[in-house]
Image (cartoon, helix red, strand yellow):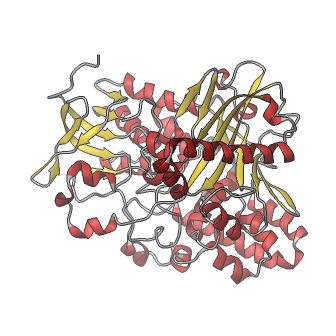
Amino acid sequence: MPRPLTGEHFDYAVVGAGVGGLAIGALLAGAGKRVIIFERHYLPGGYGQTFHVGEFAFCAELHYVWDCGEGQRVYRMLQKLGLHEEIRFRRLNPDGFDRIIAPGIDYTIGSGFDRERRRLSERFPECSEGLSKYYHTIASIHSEMYKLPIGFSWWTLASHPIRFRHIIRFLGWTLQEYFDALGFPRQLQLILAGQSAIFFMPPAQLSLLAHSTGVGSYDSGAYVPEKSFGYVIESLVSYIRRQPGCSVQLATEVTRIPVEDGRVRGVQTSRGDSIEADWVLFDGDPQLSLSLIGEGQFPESFRRKLHYDYGISALSVYLGLKGVDLRAAGFGDENIYWHPSDDLNAVYARQAADGIPDEPYFFCDAPTVRMTDPRLAPAGCHQLVMISPCSYEYFRRLRDRSEAEYQAAKQQYAERLISLAERHFVPDLSRNIITQVVGSPLTNERFIHAPRGNCYGVPLDTSHVNLGHVNYKSPFPNMHYVGTGSAMPGFASLCHFACLLYEELTGDAFYSV
């Protein structure tokens, strides 16, 4: 039984052990602060958690990341913690780490905008000038986005109109509007937007700023941990627990955040503990904080900020394989994005529609080919992960009506994905499956506590990626938000946000100098 915590006092109580919560918790614990983290699930990591099925260990949603090379953002955070030797990342093949496939297209994207511009200009010579403009704009927006201070506002941009001129110019643009302005043909559009699984948003809706922030980061390399993403999460948890007076409490849900005289006072848990804390850091969807604190404690102006939508969810298929060599089948460093059409907007319309597409769009990768953790699979075995955006409402309606219909639909969707992978990449795939797990949007909602099973918090469209969204500040002076609800999603983005917040809280400017 865990020891009672009631009456104990901490400098920081962190609600949620996702990537953002663990990153800021580790930084503060390393600075000598007394930190306690509460996670309702028995596994830490949020979408970065690793779950075990038999002899296989699958990471829920992390596939590859950016900014992890020596001297880059994630490395600098790990260096601050003294974990840069323990947690090592391997750069994926700079000549090709994302393979975009559609009718008439089979193109592998690598690092380096200049290199990609030259390659695509040879393939689309009539777009050579437009490609130069495109890559210049993407690089400029990306650079400016990472110069923004934490909690930026309209005043930030108005005060620095030259420094943030590309953000100001393209703030309301979608990626499709920029493609149209440059006159790009549809096949070129698909190649440039084909990595859509890192946004789950079609060009007609995707914010150009969000696209630039993600794609721009891969200009300097894509990475995976040398061991596994599970090892990264475990190392952060272990680091926090090793610091004096610090703790990570799993399978412990925060049920209330009491407020007194306009300040949060700590947290109360499902175990009956009531602890005091000088600060509460909320690593979860900001809307969920309403029920923990009480809507009446929030001013109306802030409650209006919390009236946002959620992004699309996905169906995930995790396969444990025996008797098949994925390397021989062409799997290596490359992620595969398979599209049934070169019209990505139409593809997403079909994915979001009610039902199961005849030929679903999917992303897939082979973690056991790229990482070395022996816990990923037994000797001689591999794992293959397939992700396909889908309709939350469809699965919700089936589950409400019949558990049998819901389970049958999950299996039918998975079988269509497996059939496509078998047809195009791994012959006899279905005969070599020894472990299979299928997760729906409702699975995400249950285990990750993600409303509507969303993958990235709010949609990354122009109505949500703007200056009026929730940032790290809550209405309470000693409570901040630290998850994807207040920062760009992604492992590296959340680490970047955590470093900026750490500097704000402590005055230790190790990161932004």
Q: Which residue is nearer to you in this view: 509 or 111?
A: 111
Residue 496: in sight, yes or no? Answer: no
* Lateral position of residue 157 relative to residue 425, left or right: left
Query: For residue 323, what is the image quadrant?
Result: top right
Q: Which residue is nearer to you in this view: 182 or 375?
A: 375
Q: Quadrant of the N terminus?
A: top left
Query: For residue 378, what is the image quadrant?
Result: top right
Residue 181: in sight, yes or no? Answer: yes
> What residue sits 35% from the left and 37% below the top?
28
Query: For residue 427, what is the image quadrant?
Result: top right
Horizontal and vertical percent position of residue 342:
79, 67
Q: How many marks?
A: 0
* Lateral position of residue 251 relative to residue 326, left or right: left
> What residue sits 50% from the left and 27% below the top?
235
- Against 344, residue 246 (above or below) is above
Furthest toward the left, the residue is 261
> What residue sits 49% from the left and 57% below the top?
488
Q: Which residue is nearer to you in this view: 477 or 453?
A: 453
Horizontal and vertical percent position of residue 109:
78, 55
Q: Which residue is nearer to you in this view: 241 or 409?
A: 409
Horizontal and vertical percent position of residue 363:
70, 50
Horizontal and vertical percent position of residue 291:
25, 51
> What residue sits 38% from the left and 52% below the top?
285
